Image (tube, helix red, strand yellow):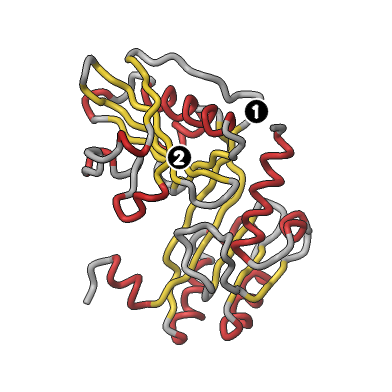
């Protein structure tokens, strides 16, 4: 699978999620499309979006429900692409959406493997390939980034690092859509800064590619440790997203009300 293949597959999936054409992400002008449900969308998404902004660096594709089209169009027309996804500008969109019962909720950066840099990295501990039957006793807080208890059926593959018989690090992936599997990583605090996270992440990425799927990695850009691990593991930034949710949803996540 070439670098171009990987990017093409990611754009095709983003197009499914957003309800647009893959070529829309390569245009220089912004694109606004109506968000609609799709059976092949990433399985953790709730569609239709009220307002979801996506950029692969060239422009902004806004996938919106029709009632949010006007504020989304006005916002992305006003600011440069890179500033649409950060403060202080995002407050403008948030303020426009708030009277309509929406708030900015999720912001994330997504990473794809760099075929020139992705390779197996050394681990000071034994690494083992794990399968769903091995995960049953691992749905505990220590491994909550690598595995998702609420979507156990999507956890399809993992790589664990073992100090003797003790699991000290775990990279897991969820089959979030047909072509792309998302990687999550956890390392016990006392075992960090030993190269375990990068070794597990890169090994799992290679295992995913061998199965004909594209691995991807998501991190908040303020999560420096996670971003560093992505880069060290052979991943590079590919696209960004910003999603609005109902004010009630956001307030609940913030423990308000």
The earlier-in-sequence mark between 2 and 1 is: 1
Q: Residue drawn at (47%, 58%), measured in percent from left and top?
A: 107
Q: What crowding class fits label 1: few (fewer than 14 Cα within 10 Å), some (14-19), or many (20 or more)?
A: some
Res 83 → quadrant: bottom right
In this picture, residue 104 sits left or right of residue 84: left
Measure the C-alpha gap from mark 2 to mark 1: 17 Å
Q: Is residue 208 above or below residue 248?
A: above
Residue 76 shows which numbered tag?
none
Residue 115 shows which numbered tag?
1
- The image position of residue 97, as x and y in percent, is 49, 80
Q: Residue drawn at (61%, 36%), measured in percent from left and top?
A: 212
In this picture, residue 17 sits left or right of residue 27: left
Quadrant that contains the N terminus: top right
- The image position of residue 29, as x and y in percent, is 77, 64
Res 103 → quadrant: bottom left
Q: What crowding class fits label 2: few (fewer than 14 Cα within 10 Å), some (14-19), or many (20 or more)?
A: many
Q: Is residue 30 above or below residue 182?
A: below
- The image position of residue 132, as x and y in percent, is 36, 39
Q: Which residue is mark 2?
A: 183
- The image position of residue 188, as x and y in percent, is 24, 30
């Amino acid at each position: 699978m070439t670098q171009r293949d990987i990017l093409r597959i990611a754009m095709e999936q983003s197009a499914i999620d957003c309800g647009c054409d893959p070529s829309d992400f390569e245009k220089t002008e912004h694109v606004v499309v109506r968000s609609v449900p799709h059976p092949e969308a990433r399985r953790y998404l709730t569609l239709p979006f009220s307002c979801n902004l996506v950029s692969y660096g060239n422009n902004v594709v806004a996938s919106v429900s029709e009632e949010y089209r006007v504020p989304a169009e006005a916002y992305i027309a006003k600011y440069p692409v890179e500033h649409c996804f950060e403060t202080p500008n995002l407050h403008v969109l948030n303020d426009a959406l708030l009277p309509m019962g929406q708030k900015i909720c999720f912001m994330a950066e997504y990473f794809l493997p760099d075929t020139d840099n992705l390779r197996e990295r050394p681990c000071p501990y034994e690494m083992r390939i794990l399968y769903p039957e091995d995960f049953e006793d691992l749905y505990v807080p220590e491994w909550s980034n690598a595995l998702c208890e609420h979507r156990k059926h999507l956890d399809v593959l993992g790589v664990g690092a073992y100090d003797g018989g003790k699991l000290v690090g775990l990279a897991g992936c969820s089959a979030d859509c047909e072509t792309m599997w998302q990687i999550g990583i956890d390392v016990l605090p006392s075992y960090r800064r030993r190269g375990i996270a990068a070794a597990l992440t890169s090994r799992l990425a290679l295992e995913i590619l061998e199965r004909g799927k594209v691995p991807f990695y998501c991190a908040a850009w303020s999560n420096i440790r996670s971003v560093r691990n992505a880069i060290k593991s052979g991943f590079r930034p590919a696209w960004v997203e910003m999603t609005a949710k109902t004010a009630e949803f956001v307030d609940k996540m913030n423990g308000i009300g």
